[in-house]
Amino acid sequence: MNKSTGVKALLVLGWLLLQMMLYQHHGVRIVYDSHRFILFTSEILADQPVTYPQVWRYLGYPLLLFPFFKAGLALSYVVWAQMAVSGVAAIALYKAAKQITGKEGLALLTVSLFAFNPDLQAWNCYILTDSLFTSLLTITLSLALLPKTRLLWIGFVLAISWTTLARPNGFIILLALTAYFVVLYKPFSKFNKWAIGLTTMLLLLGLYLALDKFMLKAFTLMIPYERGDLIYGYFEFVLTDFHQPQIPSSSLTPLGQVLWFIWVNPIYFLAMALLKGLFFLIHVKPFYSLAHNLAILAYLLPIYAFAWIGWKRGQLSASNKALLLTPVLLQVGITMLTIEDWDGRWLYPALPCFLLLAGAGISSRLSPSPKLPNLAR
């Protein structure tokens, strides 16, 4: 056994040990939203009308639950399946990091930062969409960066489909891949700029309608704006203590209410959006212990620093940059528009992008080398 194989074996054993410890500590975590997915899957299986039709927006998760429910297996099997998918995501991330950096050691470091983050890996124990969505997004992004055989192309298409269906914000993978392939192949380079502008406007209009009429239909976006809270479930610091904004009529559509609110309360909205974005990125929370917050900063700040270096100086193609930056911008934007989560889980789908950029940044600092060929075609 060579050194690389030994390190990989130790990482696998360490990851398995972490999963066992997390399962020992958390068990199967069934929280408020878990009941909706459990009930929805049970009703579909029994051919009954669904009680929570909004779960159709999370269809990818019942698709995971269905075979276990059909076989009459306990929810612990779902948790183990989520752990297994997370392991596949770690392998895919390792291969993508090696493709980007060209260095085995950096690929192992990248996957270690993903696989041994206990806050991230703990979501494997929850009967929620978060573990599955983070894993699928990681797999899809990684496959996009890798040279693909016919079998991998089939897996890639399946991963795209499942990721898109896993959560209402699953559309970010479609936009990320669109940005990637447009920059890679430049299909519009010979088109008239007015035609491109019109097409872009139509796509943005389609996205607006999809958000307004489907994805945000079940969300009450105005409640956080009216209360002034920045972190879901935390009311010790709210902006309404400093200013009381004007609230739009409930007769408007979800995005219509937001646009009205921005127009009437621009400074308030900007302050709220920037603070939500800050909490999203730094990930610390007022109700976490000092040790927990310091551990978060010690983990994230170097990643962000090297990700910036990777963006500016890393040997990354423009298409790879577009692929990795788009999910980050969309996740930040969605959080700024809605609200940061109590557990900060919205960051985790974007974390692999930061890790891959950071790997490119470290690689550029260690030994600048000629740009790697893009083999994703």
Image (tube, helix red, strand yellow):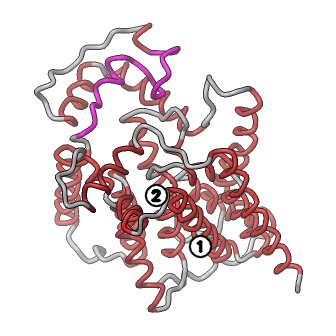
Which residue is found at the position 46% from the left and 89% from the top?
151
Residue 122 image position (x, y, % from top left): 62, 49
Q: Is residue 260 above or below residue 212?
A: above
In contact (CB < 8 Å): disc 1 and disc 2: no
Question: Is residue 234 within the magenta segment?
Answer: yes
* Residue of label 2: 133
Q: Which amino acid type is shown beneath numbered disc 1?
A: Ala
Magenta run includes residue 267:
no
Task: Tell me if residue 126 comes above or below residue 9 in the rendering.
Answer: above
Within 10 Å of the Cα at label 1, are there few (<14), some (14-19), or many (20+) other Cα atoms? many
The local crowd at label 2, few if under 14, some if 14 to 19, many if 20 or more residues have their Cα within 10 Å, is many
Would residue 357 appear left or right of 108 to someone viewing this image? Answer: left
Q: Which residue is mark 1?
A: 92
Q: Is residue 179 visible?
A: no
Magenta-drawn segment: 218-238
Q: In the figure, residue 58 lies in which quadrant?
A: bottom left
x and y, in percent, of residue 166 in the image: 38, 58
Which of the pair 121/95 is nearer the observer?
Answer: 121
* Residue 183 sits above or below residue 148 on the image: above
Q: Is residue 99 left or right of residue 238?
A: right
Q: Is residue 116 left or right of residue 260?
A: right
Element assignment for label 2: helix
Quarter of the rendering containing residue 266: top left
